[in-house]
Amino acid sequence: MAASQALSQRQRQVWQFIAKWSYNKGYPPTYREIAEGLKMASVSTVVYHLDALVKKGYLRRTDNAARSIELLIQPIPALPRNEQPKPISAAVVRVPIAGDIAASPPIQAHPERGEYLSLPIAMLNGNHDAYILRVRGWSMVEAGIGDGDLVLIQPTDIADNGEIVVACLDNDVTLKRFYREGHQVTLRPANPNYQPIQVNAAQVRIQGRLMCVIRRLSEN
């Protein structure tokens, strides 16, 4: 299969399942979760379709990792131009990269100027005011979010318990799981080497919730 060929119906279903799962949960599904979600007979069938998506440049996988699937929004740089994949959807939108956010202790935001990333408009799920932040640190690594990753954020000032949010503390921002009990808020990391942040609810301002994680290959 040439990388420039369109996806088959089943490949598209697999890609869309991974994208939707990542949007809802903030991390990619396992092979078994894909098989169960799409009612496939075996994990080997999932691997077959993932191999095709990797070859066409829509995914990257890391061996020996439980959640090893990475959606690639841009074509793999190493592919020849005539073999770069066509976009899943012809409709794309430029989403602003608004700055950095800590997946570690909170840091002060550093807004970018004029930096954008083109994404399929379907990824925004109607949230046309969505924006992107660049992650600094490793406190959310067990949620599939590492240092240097980009995260797509839906602006909102409310969140449900367990959601990964952009939280502002005294003008510093951090990316953590949100939990509220009464007047107490806990911002919980996804890394046992980091401690939860516990503060009064009045000290926390929610600025957005995680839609999905975007990883880009190095162009070097």
Image: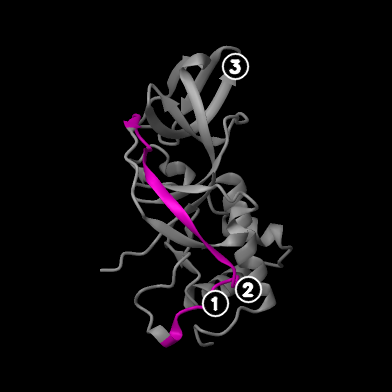
Residue 205 image offset from top left, x and y in percent: 49, 25
Q: Which residues are magenta?
A: 82-107
Residue for point 36% across, 30% down = 194
SS for callout 1: helix
The mark found on residue 181 in the picture is 3
Q: Position of residue 3 (x, y in %)?
A: 49, 83
Per the image, label 2 sits on a secondary structure element best described as helix
For marks 1 and 2, the one nearer the N-term is 2
Mark 3 is on which residue type? Glu
| In front: label 3 or label 1 | 3
* Nearer to the camera, 44 or 114: 114
Residue at 36% over, 64% down: 217
Measured Cα–Cα span from mark 3 to mark 1: 46 Å
Q: Residues within 10 Å of mark 1 (few under 14, many from 20)?
A: some
Tag 1 residue:
52
Q: Are marks 1 and 2 in contact (CB under 8 Å)?
A: yes
**What colour-coding does the image apply?**
one colour
Which residue lies under the disc numbered 2?
Answer: 11
Whether residue 134 appears in this view of the structure is no
Q: Position of residue 11 (x, y in %)?
A: 63, 73
First in sequence: mark 3 vs mark 1: 1
Amino acid tagged 2: Gln
Q: Secondary structure at mark 3?
A: strand
